[in-house]
Amino acid sequence: MQTSAKGWAKAVCREGAGEMRLEKLVLSVTAFAVSTVFAGDSLLNFDKTDPTATCILTAESPSPKYVLILFPGGDGRVAAHQTGGKILFGKRNNFLIRSRLLLADNEFATVSTDASNDEKRFSLLLDRIRQLYPHASVWLVSTSRGTLAAAQVAGKCRDRLDGVVFTASMKELRDIPLDAIKVPKLFVHHVSDACKSTPYDAARELAAKLNADFMTVSGGKTKGKPCQAFAYHGFNGLEEKVVDEIKNWIKARAQ
């Protein structure tokens, strides 16, 4: 079943470029430009025994209500580190990593980390986040190949997360027991995603099977190969609106 969350999205469906809908949710599209490094970025270590266990914490508020753990696609390696006083990291073009600048505000903080299915690693990361923000709810947001790792760790650590978001999800998700994830789930997919590994219909069918919320995105622009970050697969030109609706969904589901 695809349903809105407490009035999250109610609108009349109409044709035109730049549509995004949950059932009949329609949004206009606004292009934006962002810089690579954000003033609120800091390097966060979550395992004292391993100096490489680091991630990027992006926060505007010392007490966010929501912390979003971001799992990128591809090989999943953010590999955050500091050299010469500068924070360096990979996957900077990835939809979620480049959108951390939009996700972070006075209510939301983000943690950009390697997309790993290592339960111990993820548990240590959760411990560190809970230590920093004991009153915040924690959500796992993933994209493309990162959705596979997200599904695996969310199933194992399901009692420690408040919800999971799968964007441009892999068709192999159907082979993972997602019914083990009892927290709210949202699937976000571009209707024109031409990446063979992330077909729109497969995501929609899986969301319906799981009784999860599903957001259809359309419009924007595509550049490069179908599975790359600036194709429809990566919500190119729609980042701001997709981010806003993910945050609206989280706020509604957290109530």
Image: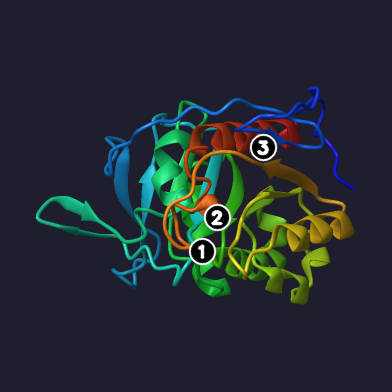
Q: Pointer 3 and pointer 1: residues touching (CB < 8 Å)?
A: no
Q: Identify the residue at horizontal 44%, vertical 65% (top origin).
A: 114
Please name the amino acid that badge 1 sits on: Cys
53 relative to 35, above or below: below
Q: Mark 2 points at which residue?
A: 233
Q: Mark 3 points at which residue?
A: 250
Please name the amino acid that badge 2 sits on: His
Q: Which of marks 1 and 2 is nearer the N terminus?
A: 1
The answer to whether residue 132 is seen in the rendering is no
Q: Pointer 3 and pointer 2: residues touching (CB < 8 Å)?
A: no
Residue 57 in percent (x, y) is at 38, 47
The image quadrant of residue 84 is bottom left
Instruction: Check residue 5 in the rendering and tell me which mark sits there, or answer none.
Output: none
Q: Mark 1 points at which residue?
A: 227
Quarter of the image that includes the C terminus: top right
Q: Residues within 10 Å of mark 3 (few under 14, many from 20)?
A: many
Farthest-out residue, front:
16
The image quadrant of residue 148 is bottom right
Q: Identify the residue at horizontal 71%, vertical 43% (top origin).
A: 216
173 relative to 41, above or below: below
Please name the amino acid that badge 3 sits on: Ile
